[in-house]
Amino acid sequence: MIGRFGFRLYSIFFKTYSEKLWGISCKELDEDFAAQRIKKLSLFEAVKNALFKSKKNKHKTLVDQFAYPIGGTGMVYERMKEFIEKNGGQVYLNTPVEKVISENNTAISIQKKSGEVIEYDHMISSMPITHLVKNLTDVPHQVIEANSNLKFRNTILVYLKLEGQNIFPDNWLYVHASDLEMGRVTNFSNWVPEINNNEKSTIVALEYWSYDDDVIWKKSDQDLIELAKSEMTKTGLIKGIEVSAGHVVKIPKCYPVYQRGYKEPLQIVENYLSGVRNLSVIGRYGAFKYNNQDHSILMGVMAAENITSGTNHNLWSINTDYEEYQEKSTITASGLSVGE
Ligand SMILES: Cc1cc2nc3c(=O)[nH]c(=O)nc-3n(C[C@H](O)[C@H](O)[C@H](O)COP(=O)(O)OP(=O)(O)OC[C@H]3O[C@@H](n4cnc5c(N)ncnc54)[C@H](O)[C@@H]3O)c2cc1C
């Protein structure tokens, strides 16, 4: 980043935000993160885009328009559920799986948290990879050790209802200021106005990130709402606007941390899991890939193709090799690939 943009821009736009997000010094962050997220954007391209706003040959990182479901991103998954059920499949919600049971390197069944065990021919796991490996049977010591070196970062979303409109014109603002704990604030009305039921109020979500032992992760909902209120006031974005309600959602293990040296233990875990028959792992936490929704969905599609059509897609390489797949396949996932 310093090489591409210079130290000053790096310290203003990259350092503080990234350190809030990952909770480690940028010196500890693996270069994979920047390579994947900022692709090959250069200072020259960023300036050219800002000055001339050309639509031609626009860099992937500089998206200013994208399709978004009118009822929010959850609609995509609701439609999938409807499709599955219409075709005779079953979807069980709120049914946590405690472990995948394997014998002789073959996954044979799952055990639900309720204790019930069910046998399946194939299992595709999107639970955090660390949880999966920890609970598999007869995992070699070296793999357990490697697995314990992979870590995840948690997210806390604090939603605030603001009694006003047009708070700010952006979808979200990235908050670099080091005197504020929040890292990003999202204004849902600016994604699709209908999402707010045409009410006169505005819902915003403030994002905070933490590890399990951090003080903020243990704070009560009420304390978090108070923190969010005071930080929004401090930004100057809600002058004179009343905050009439708040709601907190805590998402554990939602970012795989690309800390320097992570590749070695991940490779050991990947090699082991690749040898477990009838088991595929997919998704952001499932495969420890800092994917967006498009790549996560594509991993699911490809895992299904491997099972139903006998293809041999390498699910571990999605993100890096995704464009190559897109060229060959009729399935495209573009349009969702924004954000974060
Ligand atoms: C605040 C925020 C903003 C984001 N913004 C964007 C954006 O703008 N654009 C974008 O493309 N992406 C965005 N993302 C990322 C996107 O949400 C993820 O990349 C995507 O959801 C990952 O898909 P997944 O299938 O891996 O995980 P999920 O969508 O989380 O699905 C995993 C599923 O596995 C289930 N599961 C986990 N453990 C178990 C278990 N033990 N038993 C049973 N079920 C289990 C979970 O309940 C969940 O339903 C955002 C993420 C966050 C947190």
Image (cartoon, helix red, strand yellow):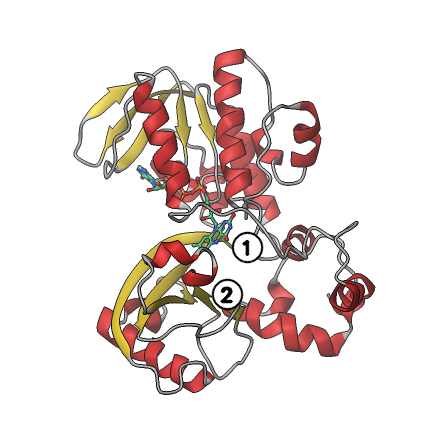
Residue 242 rendering spot, x and y as whole percentages = 29, 81
Q: Which residue is mark 2?
A: 172
Q: Estimate the spatial distance between the alpha carbons at disc 1 and disc 2, rounded to whole Å.
A: 9 Å
Classify 10 Å Cα crowding around label 2: few (below 14), some (14-19), many (20 and above). some
Is label 2 within 8 A of ligand 1 (CB to nearest ligand atom)?
Answer: no
Residue 243 rendering spot, x and y as whole percentages = 29, 77
Is label 1 within 8 A of ligand 1 (CB to nearest ligand atom)?
Answer: yes
Residue 309 rendering spot, x and y as whole percentages = 53, 12
Amino acid type at image mark 2: Trp
Inspect this view and state whether residue 213 appears: no
Tag 1–tag 2 contact (CB < 8 Å) = yes
Q: Nearer the viewer, residue 47 or 253?
A: 47
Inspect this view and state whether residue 4 appears: yes
Q: Which residue is mark 1?
A: 339
Sequence-first disc among 1 and 2: 2
121 left or right of 235 in image: left
Residue 169 rendering spot, x and y as whole percentages = 52, 70
Amino acid type at image mark 1: Gly
